Image: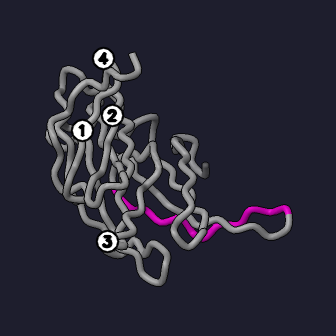
Amino acid sequence: PKKASLRFFDPCLWRDNANNIWLFFTKSNTYWDGIAGVWATKLTRKKDTILNTPARRLFDGVMMNKPVYLSSLNDILYPVSLWNTPPTPPSKTGTFIYKSDVAANTPQFNSMIMYSSLKVPDNIRTFDEHQLVETNIPGHVLCFVRTKVGIYSCTSMDYGRTWSKLEPFKSVG
């Protein structure tokens, strides 16, 4: 980093539907400045060198897991959190799903919208780390969330717009 106080963390590699490789990462002015920010850069390779496009800031928060491409809608869902950790005001925190469309077979990052959010009770909420996957049922998206008391899950039947109640996922222990 150019400034000693800058922190870059939570790298997340993703291959889009056109086989481009993207690096998403979080940048904060300190360990946690209350907002941070999710950034993206497209990676290419030239011989033994990895090249990248200029990084672009996408949203406030942290994205610890890969986006999900919804082929039936030609949209991308991004699992992004604003942690319930000082100095973030409690009213701004959340476990969010952002959405963008895809043009010319690559993410454009021009039409980012806050699409939905998950209701994670404060007494079990931690660093969220929610993950999304589209199942083989049209419109069905499954979500797992890290909590203080284990893995919780919820589902959406409308491509991530609305979510069922978060419940403990007990199938693995």
Q: Residues within 10 Å of mark 1 (few under 14, many from 20)?
A: some
Looking at the rendered structure, the secondary structure element under dot 3 is loop
For the question of whether residue 86 can be seen, the reply is no
Q: Name the residue at 26% across, 32% down.
A: 84
Of callouts 3 and 2, which one flags the residue occurring earlier in the amino acid sequence? 3
Q: Which residue is mark 2?
A: 145
Q: Name the residue at 85% across, 62% down.
A: 48
Image quarter where the C terminus lies is: top left
Of callouts 1 and 2, which one flags the residue occurring earlier in the amino acid sequence? 2
Q: Amino acid at mark 2?
A: Val
Q: Is residue 6 toward the left or the right of residue 67 in the image?
A: right
- In reply to whether residue 49 is colored magenta, the answer given is yes
Cβ–Cβ under 8 Å for marks 3 and 4: no
Q: Residues within 10 Å of mark 2 (few under 14, many from 20)?
A: many
Q: Position of residue 38 (x, y in %)?
A: 42, 53
Residues under labels 3 and 1: Cα distance? 21 Å
Q: Position of residue 138 (x, y in %)?
A: 28, 60
Residues under labels 3 and 4: Cα distance? 34 Å
Q: Which residue is mark 4?
A: 149
Q: Amino acid at mark 3?
A: Leu
Cβ–Cβ under 8 Å for marks 1 and 2: yes
Magenta part of the protein: which range? 48-59
Residues under labels 3 and 2: Cα distance? 24 Å
Q: Which residue is mark 3?
A: 73
Q: Name the residue at 50% across, 61% down.
A: 40
Q: Is residue 115 toward the left or the right of residue 46 in the image?
A: left
Looking at the rendered structure, the secondary structure element under dot 4 is loop
Looking at the rendered structure, the secondary structure element under dot 2 is strand
Q: Total of numbered circles in the picture?
A: 4
Q: Amino acid at mark 4?
A: Val
